[in-house]
Amino acid sequence: MSPKSTPGPAARTWAIFSKPWAGLAADELGPLITGMGFDAAEVPVRDGAYLRPDTTGARLADFVHRLAGHGVQVISIASEPTEPMLAACAEAGVPMIRIMAPIGAQGYRASVDRLRTRFDALAPLCSRYGVEIGIQPHHGAFVSTVLGVHELIKDLAPQFRIVWDAAHDALAGENPAYTLEQCGDRLGLVNLKNAEYRRVSDDSPFRYRSWFDAGDQGLADWPLIMDVLRRISYHGPICLTAQYTDRTPEQTAVQATTDLAWVRSLDRDGVSAR
């Protein structure tokens, strides 16, 4: 089932990306997530995490089951969409794998062509296993805009979705009032975080760097975003990605709790944009 098909605003699912606590087993992670106020999670599956690509087939279903016992639904994983990973997600009941679309040294157009070839090969596997692939725009050496991702997937099966990300949308200079609407029926997941560009040392070859901060600090206007989500009748899950520059996991948990309380008030009360 597509994440967007969750019925009605009263059923809103609030997820957190568990990357800051990637090494925790499910019975440790579950109480941490619910203690912050969330009822769902996106889980990283990568080297160095509790769930690794080489062990996911044996571990993912049990991990998901144990999290469910703590009241936490796994709405997606962040990993490479290989056939073993798609099969593991299908067995565990995980509906989506989130990825980015990297741009290689060969340039933008060649990279897009390479990605399209890969997605064409994945399309029948997504249909076979009933698992979606969510592509997130990302600033830097990736396809960075909603329209860019649309170009990648426009004539592919509906299992290819857009994961809209507030911070990366803002870092790309986009307007959420436009880009959320541009997603159309491809919108599969909304990520909330905030970021800005900060000047770095004059000795650095890069003049500015991205800096991720609290929900009300940065270029992304969360009140506006929540207004737009109401306007387009998006009732699917919202994932706070728990990305805060230079914060410990403990500090991250405190800030994510604060951000969740604020954005839930925006979702409930219909606060207009600042």
Image (spheres, rainbow, N blue to C red):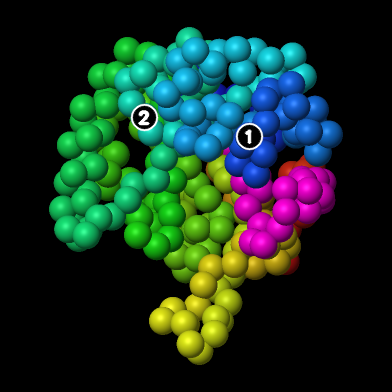
Side (left or right) of 15 relative to 84: right
Numbered circles on residues, count: 2
**Magenta segment includes 258:** yes
Q: Which residue is mark 2?
A: 81
- Camera-side residue: 148 or 269? 148
Magenta stretch? 234-262
Image quadrant containing the C terminus: bottom right
Viewer-closest of 213 and 227 = 213
Q: Which residue is mark 1?
A: 23
- Name the element at disc 2: loop
Indicate the position of residue 173 as horizontal and vertical percent values.
47, 68
- Residue 143 against residue 77 in the figure, above or below: below
Task: Identify which residue, 4 or 94, lies in the foreground.
Answer: 94
- Give whichever of 82, 131 is nearer the camera: 82
Quadrant in the rendering for residue 97: top left
Q: Residue furthest bottom?
A: 202
Q: Dividing the picture into quarters, in which one does residue 183 lie?
A: top left
Residue at point 54% right, 68% down?
210
Q: Are marks 1 and 2 in contact (CB under 8 Å)?
A: no
What's the amino acid at mark 2? Pro
Q: Is residue 224 above or below residue 59?
A: below
| Crowding near the residue tagged with mark 2, few <14, some 14–19, many ≥20 C-alpha atoms within 10 Å | many
The residue under the point 25% across, 55% down is 104
